[in-house]
Image: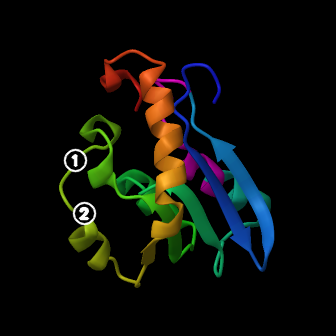
């Protein structure tokens, strides 16, 4: 955990190779770790067809859209947004209907086995920082 940076990270993997990995930016950074990792991968090698984006928290609509436009069609996450503060997202409503309406199918997978470990990291960070979570996105 890096200072006030929210403990979010993202990794783009293609053909078993890590293409990029990023951590969250300090507020008011524009891009979440997800978008940063996808942008870095795209800058390195263009369209990421066949790549997988791995993230700790379910991606927001912005990050999902960035991944989509970069050619990524599979995202794997550990914690659904319903299990963390609504301040971490543009909406706490279910956005799966929006993603389902994309022109191409996007497979977004909740890897439940990692949820307790990742949630522990998030809770530890929250306990060590201000209770005003509106400043973390």
Answer few, some or many: residues within 10 Å of disc 2's Cα (few below 14, many 20 plus, some between 14 and 19): few
| Mark 2 to mark 1 CA distance (whole Å) | 8 Å
Q: In which image quadrant can residue 90 be found?
A: top left
Rendered-image quadrant of the C terminus: top left
Q: Is residue 106 left or right of residue 16?
A: left
Residue 31 shows up from this direction: no
Where is residue 101? Give x, y as percent: 26, 78
Query: Which secondary structure lies at badge 2?
Result: loop
Which of the colour schemes (rainbow, by chain, secondary structure, one colour) is used? Answer: rainbow
Where is residue 37? Give x, y as percent: 64, 52
Q: In which image quadrant can residue 123 be found?
A: top left
Kindly give the residue lying farthest to the left in the view shown.
93
Please give the label number shown on residue 95.
2
Kindly give the residue lying farthest to the top in the view shown.
130
Rendered-image quadrant of the N terminus: top right
Please give the label number shown on residue 83.
none
Q: Is residue 125 left or right of residue 51?
A: left
Q: Is residue 29 magenta?
A: yes
Please give the label number shown on residue 91.
1
Query: Which secondary structure lies at badge 1?
Result: loop
Residue 7 shows up from this direction: yes
Where is residue 119? Give x, y as percent: 46, 47
Mark 2 touches mark 1? (CB < 8 Å):
yes
Q: Is residue 18 left or right of residue 97?
A: right
Q: Work out whether 75 lies above or below 131.
A: below
Q: Work out whether 14 lies above or below 12.
A: below
State which region is magenta: 26-38
Where is residue 136? Give x, y as percent: 41, 27
């Amino acid at each position: 955990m890096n200072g006030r940076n929210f403990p979010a990270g993202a990794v783009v993997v293609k053909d078993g190779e890590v293409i990029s990995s990023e951590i969250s930016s300090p507020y008011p950074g524009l891009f979440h770790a997800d978008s940063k990792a996808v942008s870095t991968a795209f800058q390195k090698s263009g369209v990421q067809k066949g790549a997988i984006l791995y993230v700790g928290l379910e991606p927001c609509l912005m990050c999902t859209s960035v991944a989509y436009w970069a050619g990524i069609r599979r995202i794997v996450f550990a914690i659904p947004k319903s299990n963390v503060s609504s301040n971490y997202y543009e909406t706490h409503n279910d956005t799966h209907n929006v993603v389902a309406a994309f022109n191409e199918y996007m497979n977004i997978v909740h890897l439940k086995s990692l949820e307790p470990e990742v949630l522990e990291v998030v809770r530890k960070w929250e306990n060590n920082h201000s209770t005003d979570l509106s400043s973390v996105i």
